[in-house]
Image: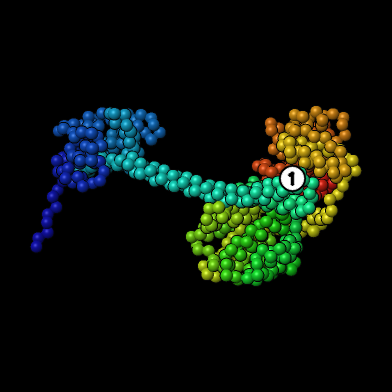
Amino acid sequence: MPKPQRKPKQAGLDWFSSDLIEILPAAVYVCNIDAVVVAYNRRATELWGRAPKIGDTDLKFCGSHKLFRPDGTFLPHAETPMEMVLRTGKPARDQEVIIEQPDGTRLTALVNIAPIFDDRGTLIGAVNCFQDLSAHQKTETEKVKSREELHQAQKIQSLGQLTGGIAHDFNNLIGEITGSLDLVRRRLEVGRTDGIDGFVAAAAKAAERAGVLTHRLLAFARQQSLDIRPMDVNDLVAGMGDMLRRTLGENVAFETVLKRDLWWALTDANQLDSVLVNLVVNARDAMPDGGRLTVETTNMPLDAAYASTHGDVEPGDYVMIAVSDTGCGIPASVIAKVFDPFFTTKPIGQGTGLGLSMVHGFAKQSGGHVRIHSQVGQGSSIKLYLPRAPRDAEQLAEPVVEATPRGSGEMILVVDDNDALRSVMTEVVRELGYRHLEAHNADTAIPLLLSDQPIDLLVTDVGLPNMNGRQLAEIARQHRPGLKVLFVTGYAQNATLRGEFLAPGMEMLTKPFTFSSLGAKIRALIES
């Protein structure tokens, strides 16, 4: 069979039929060297809103539309991609233009234009291809909007989970406090004092648990005030042993594996205590039929190779605490969410979703990190990494004060805008043998600080109105260099890391606090 003969190109463009470009998904039209349209497809007429007539130039075909560059500046016809191609013979590739239609609406098009040469290499025309990006952009915008709406719905759902859990817990605590105080009041009204100590103790315990819940909220938000000091983690774990055993119940075997010569860690002992209790309770709940729970400590140097594969950790020396159980394990799909704020698998009202997110927030705020390893049906292990303390940490550690120390008539200025709390603090100060002055804000405190009145210690809330406690302390020290200052705070965003907030001769006490802790802080500062 003879081979088909290739039909040579004609000198003009009459061989370029619209049928050749009709199948293309973009708007395509072909012009000769004089910019006269010789072929076009249906999408071109849709884009430009009309069909060209014989002899129409490109300018006439598209003339009712204005072109703009991506930055919004006007694009003159002489500088359009097609004019540049017909002048230079060089193709135009992937150029974006904005097309303004006669009604004022705009669309973005991706332009590709190829020059056409005859057999002698003479430029005879160009193929213009316009791809409307607006539909694609609209689809992408709708996808982004849908993702944002889904994310917002999830946030609202999470907030509902949080609100339900916290409301449930706080209502129980408030009920315990108000009920106990009401019983105390009723008995005192009739002259009875039997059983009052028990009611007061119950109210105090409930208030303490309310404080712990508040700290959990601040911990997952990384806004709690951490008292980071060198400490022996082995001592803390050993000291909590009996309490943790009671928490687990009889059907869970409990053991500790404490490394000898464990490095000291830099951490907040009270918050670490809460974290361990939290992890142990989670482990207990994962073993409803019983099992074994192990708390292990070890030294853990993390090198640059480890840090490079775990982007949220710095290389260095860490003290690792692992809480491991033989429970039901956690599915991989859940592990990805367990550290998210408010995430919980418990029904609304039975969990706030603050547990593991609090652990994660505490770890990151402490300069460490946390990892979880789990297999369904085989158990879980949550590993908390805390930065190693300096090698002379044992000498830096403060001695434990067993009893509440008393004062010797020193003068203390108490500043707090909460009248009830200020009244309680001044009463504690008086009971401990100190004299006191009081002010409800910085404006009333400053005249006292600028006076000749002897003042041995300033006790001030951080979150005062208009002027915060740190600013007040600076003013006080300008008139009284070396004045000792004790800050009390329930929430202070700029006081989360005490080392960055406190100057020498300053200390911080987190609300809520006990009679003993306030007295110990006051005495330690005065004697320092």
Left/right placement of residue 500 relative to residue 292 reads right
**How far from the left and from the top, in percent, is residue 64?**
26, 28
Residue 344 shows up from this direction: yes
Residue 308 shows up from this direction: no
**How far from the left and from the top, in percent, is residue 316?**
66, 58
- How many residues crowd around disc 1 within 10 Å: few (fewer than 14), some, or many (20 or more)? some
- Please state the total of marks drawn on the protein image: 1
State the residue at coordinates (11%, 56%): 4
Q: Which residue is mark 1?
A: 185
Choose between 50 and 453: the one closer to the eye.
453
State the residue at coordinates (59%, 50%): 168
**Colour treatment of the image:** rainbow
Left/right placement of residue 406 relative to residue 364 reads right
Left/right placement of residue 439 relative to residue 495 reads right
Left/right placement of residue 41 relative to residue 339 reads left
Choose between 82 and 181: the one closer to the eye.
181
Q: What residue type is disc 1 on?
A: Arg
Q: Which element type, helix, strand or loop, lies under badge 1?
A: helix
State the residue at coordinates (35%, 32%): 68
Choose between 26 and 460: the one closer to the eye.
460
**How far from the left and from the top, in percent, is residue 325?**
60, 67
